[in-house]
Each structure stands twice: as C-alpha cells, then as structure tokens.
Image (tube, grey):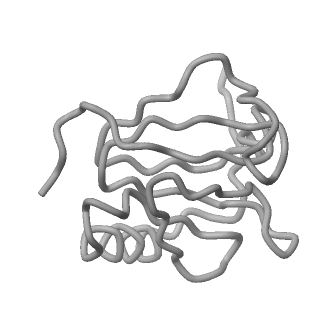
Amino acid sequence: MSLSVPVVGHVDLDKDYSQYQACKAADPQLVFAAIRYGEGPPELVEYNQCVPWRKDGDVIANAVFCQPASCFVFSDVNCEVGPSVPVPVDVPVPIDFLNAVDFVELLGQSAYCSPNKIPRVN
C-alpha cells in the first residue's frame, strides 16, 4: 500500500533555494520567510504581516522559513476573524512548507507570524 500526496504546482528546488536565499539576505529582525504564490516570484514576509493564502487567484505554493516564528491562522483573508486554530504554530528553521492539496485552506484563509523564543539563525 502506498500513499501519494499531490502538491500544488511542482517542486522546484531552484525556486525554493532562491526563496531561502532572498529570506536569508533580508533583515533577520524583520523578515522570517519567503513565500511564492503559484509560479510567481518569491515574496518576503515580515513578522506580524497578514498573509492571505490566495492572491490574484493563486494559492501559496510553498513557504520557506529562514527565522523562527509563531504563526496564528485566521478564518478570513485579513487576519481579523479567529484565530481559527486554538494555539499558535511554532516554526523552527530552516524549513520548507509545501502546500499539499491546498492543505492550508483547510485551516483558515490567512495568517501572521510573530517572533518566538526559538534560537535565531544568523
């Protein structure tokens, strides 16, 4: 028996690496991740920035975290209704989240992340 999990888009190691490099080159006190909507370019994400799962019809294909964060998921696209998950999601680093079968949309519609006490990567 085997399990096959489809992934939104395809895994592109070059794009993932460029996301990680963009994140690492940014100010670590402000930026904790780089995301990519669909096949679009990497976008840096700052702490406490509300990030909707969809933008211009594209869902976040993956998120590359380069700094630790505690993330809060919300039921709406503006990070105002919720949080829809009862506890924050603590993210260690480095990690690459692939959005398998639009998994994130099962949790909510947006999120923001704050710094946490996990040791930072310099």
Residue pictured at 25% horizontal, 62% vertical = 28
Q: Residue furthest front?
A: 80
From the top left corner, tell me how far across and down residue 13 is, in percent: 43, 68
Total marks shown come to 0
Quadrant including the C terminus:
bottom left
Q: Is residue 106 left or right of residue 23?
A: right
Residue pictured at 59% horizontal, 69% vertical = 36
Q: Residue furthest left?
A: 122
From the top left corner, tell me how far across and down residue 6 is, in percent: 72, 47
Quadrant including the N terminus:
top right
From the top left corner, tell me how far across and down residue 17 is, in percent: 36, 71
**Camera-side residue of 6 and 70:** 70
From the top left corner, tell me how far across and down residue 20 is, in percent: 34, 67
Q: Is residue 57 left or right of residue 63?
A: right
Is 100 situated above or below 22?
Answer: above
**Camera-side residue of 51 and 57:** 51
